[in-house]
Image (cartoon, rainbow, N blue to C red):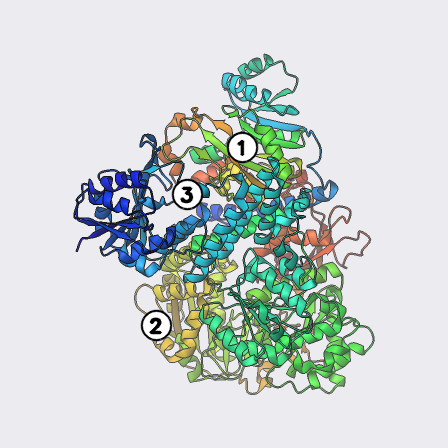
Amino acid sequence: MIVDLPRRSETPEGKVQRLFRNKRILDDVQVTQARISLNRERVRRPDIWSDPEPLITVRICTYNRPQLLVERAVASVLRQTYQNFEVLVIGDHASPETAQALSRVTDPRVRYVNLPERARYPNFPRFFWQTAGAYPALAAHELATGEWMAFLDDDDEYTSDHLEALLAHARLWRLEMVYAKVKLIDPPADYDFVGSEPLTVGCIASGSVMFSRRLFCVRPDPHGWVNDLPGDWLLWSKMQKIGARIGFLDRFVTLHYPEHTMVDDEDQADILDRTPTSDEIISDLEHVGGLHMLDLA
Amino acid sequence: MPKLTVAIPTYDRKDYLEEAVRSTLAQSYGDFELLVVLDNPARQDIVDHLEMLGDKRLKILVNSRTIGLFPNFNRCVDLATGDYLYIMHDDDLMEPDNLARKVEFLDAFPRAAFVHSAYSLIDGSGRITQSGIHLADPFDTIIPGDVFIRKSFLTLNTVCCPSVMMRRDAAQRAGLWDVSIEWTADWEYWLRLAAQGDVGYLAASLFRYRVHETNESRKFDAPSRAIAAYINCKRSAFSKLCSSTAGLGELLGVAHALHGREALEHGLNSLASGDRAEAGACARLAVALLPEARVLLEANGLAGMLVEPGPDLASLGLGSNPLETAISAAPQRDLSMPVLVWVGDDESHAVATVERLELQSVPPTAVYLAGPGAPGLSHLQSQLVRITSSEDRVWSMLHACLETGAKDFAFLDAGALPGADWLAGVKAAFGSPEVGVVWGPVTETSIPARERIRSIEGSAQDKVASGSFALRRTVVEAACRTTDLGGAGAFLKAAASCGLKSILLPQAAVAWQGGVASASNDPLGLGPLVVCAPDWQGQAWTEVVKAFLTSDLGSRKPLLVLLSPASETGGNGARVVAALRTAGIDAESCPDIMLQSVSNEPGELKAWALRAQQVLTTGSELEAKLVGAQAMPPKKTLDTRDQLNWLARYVPLEAILNESGRNSLLEVGSGHRGAGCVVASAFVGIDIAFSQAPIAPMVGIAYDGNRLPFKSAAFHTVLSMDALEHVPPDKRSAFIRELLRASADRVILGFPADSEGRKGDRYMQELFRRLSLGQPDWLFEHDEHGLPESLQVEGLFDSIPEWQWRELPTPGSLACLLISFADILPGADQWVKEAIRDDAEGFRRWLGAASFGPRSRRVYLLERREPLAPSIDLDDRTTLVSALICPTCHGDFQATREQALECTACRARFCNDERQVLVLKSMAQVSPDVTFLLEPDWLGSTAWVGAIHNFLTAFEGNDPCRLWLRVNPALLTLDEAVSLLQPILAEFGERPIPEVYLSNDETEALPAGPIVTLPSSTDELRDWSPTTYIHVFRDRLFERRAA
């Protein structure tokens, strides 16, 4: 039974204000939940560092970039000095070419899962950029079997000792999450690397991160766009908030290539900086099915 | 006199020296003198050789005896006469434009203390091996000296020594090169020089640095062998700089942490390369600089690195006494204050303490030793430590330390408790009750070592970045970790006598359940707030109450807070009243006792205690209750405990409210304070709900928001400020008519209105958002109902012939906005209130003069054309009773013997609630006592958040319903459930919310009355959103009431 209640008249601005407030409440509750879960995990298995050869899940989310995926990204994982890994490729409802390309990789450690339908992302360009890939990421959290998870973009490349170096650093400092530097190929003039201490937005690239299963309780948020922050940063900041043991390895472990993205194609850098109107936010909210966030009166 | 002095200190490098001199003389810039200062009287041949060059700018000076490298540098500084000074190395070469570029730079930037540049490397034969070497950022820059210094802490030395041209007067101010620093004297000198002005950098390679077999700096290129010694040099260089240069003291901690970490990393590297001796030296240094390094080493099974005994380790006495444990566990920030150590009988503890404190990663700014044992510790005298046994001296030390800007201090006690007099003296010395007390021993917390390092570095770097080192945070918090009753009592006394505003002892309160008697022994020594959890059985607890009440408490009258299980608060309240009555005390005259509903269940008690503690430290709710509990004297001065926007609201009406009809004033929508800001005589405040007990002289009445429960023309004046906008638009006309009906003579009605009011709201919303504060309820309500339109309201006035109206002047938008800022911006109100306290009259005049420009609030005065005589005179309270009408049947009242009011018509009875508010709500509304039952999916989907939020939104504190939350004890503790509720509850601030229960016992009986089970599974909630559900229920409930 759905009771249709005459809702109070609410301006779009008021509605958006309420949305922001509700998102903050829900985020705070989720962070508290994750903190509790993390404490449970720490008690359940105090030592995650002694296992001589833990399985590491390398997560690659992809969308229609089969050649780079196989020849650059997956290949760089397969030639790692540390070999106990699984490569979990999640397609965001990618076209069949991706499956075909991956079928030529015979290594049994490579798994490919394609989402049955394309997720609905916000239309507003910055929100799209912040959120795209959140659903495959969420799926990967469910499907990963490793004790550790590392992220790789489908057009980037690991250094050959990527997993070994991050794992060693995590063991040395007994970390639950470790990140390092990413080297930019053909970088903008003013910087060559992304990744520095202290952990703040813009100072970490997800391609350099590895974290323990303990932190799987922090899950990618498909509605992170409401916070107007990049999805991966929300993940790291939540880990920070719940008191994960985070450490930085001061060297580069990943190469980032300047491939074109869907956002570049639109060539609308100024649109990325624009402030959305309340109506645009509401319309995106309806579009992606996030109306439940307005449940809090 | 030449503008520039170039000086070349030299010893015996004849060939290279000639090249250096030639490259100097060949500069494109010519206005300089060139001093060659030969530190080797035996080499007259060098003098002769150079004189052959025949340039009259060249002067050669020979020291009469060899004095050494850096002393010779100092001699160069002494001998120089130019405005600028360039100390050239005898084995390097200048590019032709070197001097010209740097002179040009110093000319252009008069605030620059020195300028340095990029360079090239050459080998022994002068061949360039590498060019464009930048130690700093590769741009031409000029940065402030303090920025340069802070950057230098976080990076390596960024100055290549022979590239520097400095301003000679800056060099003189900076002092001499420190010859006692072995390796890093140049670095230390640049930092000191940077303290004199800005630092410039030129990105062009302006000179050539020769790398050859006999480089002096060769021995500084510490190979892996001597890194520990090298870091130790750096450490002492920084220590000297920090202690000698004003404003840099706080950086010492950063330097220690960074050097400790550097030592640790080199130590681990050395271990990896098999050099155990060096690894051990590094590890010991790291542990000395950064205590966490020990934890890290131990956690990684590397504690063996520390085994080799070193003299400094032996004296540390690590882990040997509880005090030391306390220090190492105390939050680092607390140690960046001065530390007082009370030296009792056991001097060895104090010795270990001082030594350990000096090595803290964030050491205290000073350590004061005082007490009977202190003189025996005179051998500890160092830069950090001051010792005295004379109490007078302690105070003068404290004053000295206060002058450095420190406002907090930590007191660490070695076991012997100093007397209350001593602490009172401390308080006097600080001239402030806001003294932080860290009470040891604090239990060791098991923060992972890595996190602690990070947090130390983070906070230290923040400090550097913000450039503000004065710790202005004041601590009003006393943490007592003892369950020992005697200790708790002694602590209470000491803390109270040093003036701490409030004292909360969560553990001790629990311990007192059996031992309440000791609280009654000497209530005089207790602070203004005593928390006690009686067992409520038998009569023992009443002795406490009686002792408390019958003591001569004088001006330091504390508030006794009695904790009571929530379910029995009503009964216990009656017991307190009965106990008072048997003691012959009138409960009404005894506002010093507060009954706090809280379960005896330890988890809930703890949650309450934590919240109260939080409130105490932020000084809001509980303090307000404390204030409210004290009788408010009639006053002429403004009470600075009131919110500033209240003052802005009422002060302009001060004259008109006090002028006539003094004892016959009704305020509608008053809240707990209302016109009490400016009115000293009794008045009636009526509101839908009271979040706190009404503050005297207000007499509080709660009603249902519809008809005022008074006969017509009962009051001389009826006042309503900022209430109309909270009334739904369709009820506003009725609301105003009710005001007029209750008034015999005049009505004052004020409310935010029109577009100007909405603009103000938008500013406020934006402000709350930017401050990341939750938006308060009243702002939401403005949005919900929309602000009134003044034209409509005036139209209504015009339509009522018995009344005439005019608008009263009121402060304009600008003043209101400024005042709201002062209320909202954290800490701002203190400044403003201080100003108001100093000149209340000036503030009144300012508000009066501020009625210019657009105004967000409209205030109207309505007067009856033919005034009536009010029936209420509050000097005679019986007139109030006879002017009340029953909210249910509008009948008259009579007072009953049980201090209740009974309707003579329908026999309904009404009485005061626990806040001393007379609740006059229609009986028809009080009956359905509903329990909403919900078992949230605590750790799963967050759909239940909406259910709880909407319950709290839909109902208010006095509504007859409750939320019963089930917790499965196998999944979640009650503490965890409370932590999950915090983000939801936080939104409601101080608004009174309906009762929420947490139950982890499924067999527990639910309260009587109807039970409504809220859907808890996600799927159910999807179809039936909690908003819809609860609001529909709410509407039904209220509809029934209305009918």
State if disc 3 and disc 1 touch (CB < 8 Å): no
Give the residue type at disc 2: Pro
- Residue B671 screen position, x and y as percent: 53, 69
Give the residue type at disc 1: Ser
Q: Considering depth in this image, is B945 or B593 the residue closer to the camera?
A: B593
- How many marks the image carries: the answer is 3
| Disc number for residue B217 | 3
The answer, for residue B1043, to whether it is visible in the render is no
- Residue B976 screen position, x and y as percent: 69, 51
Q: Residues within 10 Å of mark 2 (few under 14, many from 20)?
A: some
Q: Is residue A235 above or below residue B512?
A: above
Q: Considering depth in this image, is B1029 or B991 the residue closer to the camera?
A: B991
Tag 2 secondary structure: loop
Residue identified by numbered label 2: B809
Q: Is residue B727 above or below residue B635?
A: above
Residue identified by numbered label 1: A208
Give the residue type at disc 3: Ser
**Residue located 47% across and 62% down the image:** B826
As drawn, is A283 to the left or to the right of A45?
left
State if disc 2 and disc 1 touch (CB < 8 Å): no
- Residue A255 screen position, x and y as percent: 49, 27
Tag 3 secondary structure: helix
